[in-house]
Image (spheres, rainbow, N blue to C red):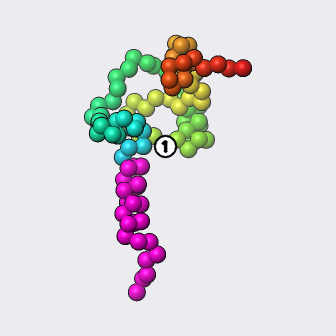
Amino acid sequence: AVVSTQSTGEKEEEMILKSVEENTALMGVQELAQGITYTESIKTSWTPPRYIKLHKCDKLREKFTICVTGNDIPPALKYFKDMKLPIPIWLLDGEGNYQTFS
């Protein structure tokens, strides 16, 4: 006979945490609380800068263990500023304030 060291409650909690981690890894707290789900990807007009080399992106994904699947996967970039977004966007912190660098 195999003796389990975990109680039923601990096993149940572990199962719940695993399902939440798998299905909601990139969702915000408000989206989770309100039950918001997305069925389509966000459409954007952003395209990678021309100087981005796809073979370097593959090396970057390998180096940082970035696993991707799907169609039209954007290139992996080491720095957010490499996306060549307008400066006000990438200088903002999460609350809409400009970051200061010293």
Name which residue type carries label 1: Cys
Q: Please state if 88 lies on the left or on the right of 10 as rendered.
A: right
Does 92 sit above or below residue 36? above
Neighbour tally class for label 1: few under 14, some 14-19, many 20 plus, Cα within 10 Å:
few
Residue that label 1 marks: 67
Q: Position of residue 17 (x, y in %)?
A: 41, 54
The total of numbered circles placed on residues is 1
Magenta residue span: 1-22
Does 33 sit above or below residue 5? above
Does 37 sit above or below residue 96? below
Based on the picture, tell me whether residue 3 belongs to the magenta stretch: yes
Q: Please state if 58 lies on the left or on the right of 24 as rendered.
A: right
Q: Nearer the viewer, residue 44 or 9?
A: 9
Q: Quadrant of residue 65?
A: top right
**Residue plotted at (46% across, 29% down):** 74
**Visible in this render: residue 74?**
yes
